[in-house]
Image (cartoon, rainbow, N blue to C red):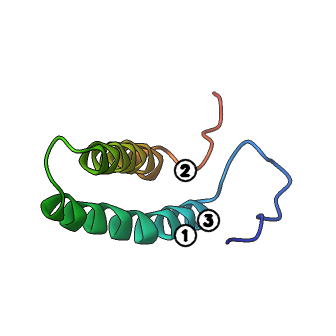
Amino acid sequence: MLPAPDRGDTTTMSSSALRETVHEINNPLFAILGLTEFLLRDVEPGSKSHERLLLIQQSGLEIKEIVKTLRDSPHEPTEAA
């Protein structure tokens, strides 16, 4: 787990801290999505296990989109004119 960044402004995150956080989330997320895909091949479609794996997969894909949004959002505050 990452240590909490030492910063005065808690509303913004530096670009490097954000990149590190995205990286730390993506590594296990890709493992979860990959393993779920393999497990889905081994279980009977329509079974309770299959439905649960689909839920895990869908949740992982939603997290992936959240991480993508964080990664692509502006990282540093802009000064008002």
The dot on residue 10 is: none
Q: Out of 48 and 6, give the one closest to the viewer.
A: 48
Q: Position of residue 4 (x, y in %)?
A: 78, 64
Position of residue 67 in the picture relative to residue 33 (left or right)? right
Q: Is residue 13 above or below residue 20?
A: above
Q: Secondary structure at mark 3?
A: helix
Q: Earlier in the sequence, mark 2 or mark 3?
A: 3
Disc 3 residue type (three-letter): Ala
Task: Tell me the quarter of the image containing the C terminus.
Answer: top right
Task: Tell me the quarter of the image containing the N terminus.
Answer: bottom right
Mark nearest the camera among 2 and 1 is 1
Q: Position of residue 31 (x, y in %)?
A: 35, 71
Q: Is residue 11 above or below residue 3?
A: above
Query: Which residue matches tag 2?
Result: 75
The dot on residue 17 is: 3
Disc 1 residue type (three-letter): Glu
Question: Which residue is at 34% across, 66% downward?
Answer: 30
For disc 3, the neighbor class at 10 Å (few under 14, some 14 to 19, many from 20) is some
Residue 41 sits in quarter: bottom left
Q: Out of 60 and 77, give the one closest to the viewer.
A: 60
Q: CA distance from mark 1 to mark 3?
A: 5 Å
Query: Which residue matches tag 1?
Result: 20
Q: CA distance from mark 2 to mark 3?
A: 10 Å
Disc 2 residue type (three-letter): His
Q: Secondary structure at mark 1?
A: helix
The reply to whether discs 2 and 1 touch (Cβ–Cβ < 8 Å) is no
The reply to whether discs 1 and 3 touch (Cβ–Cβ < 8 Å) is yes
Q: Secondary structure at mark 2?
A: loop
Question: Which residue is at 60% across, 39% downward?
Answer: 78
Q: Position of residue 43 (x, y in %)?
A: 18, 58
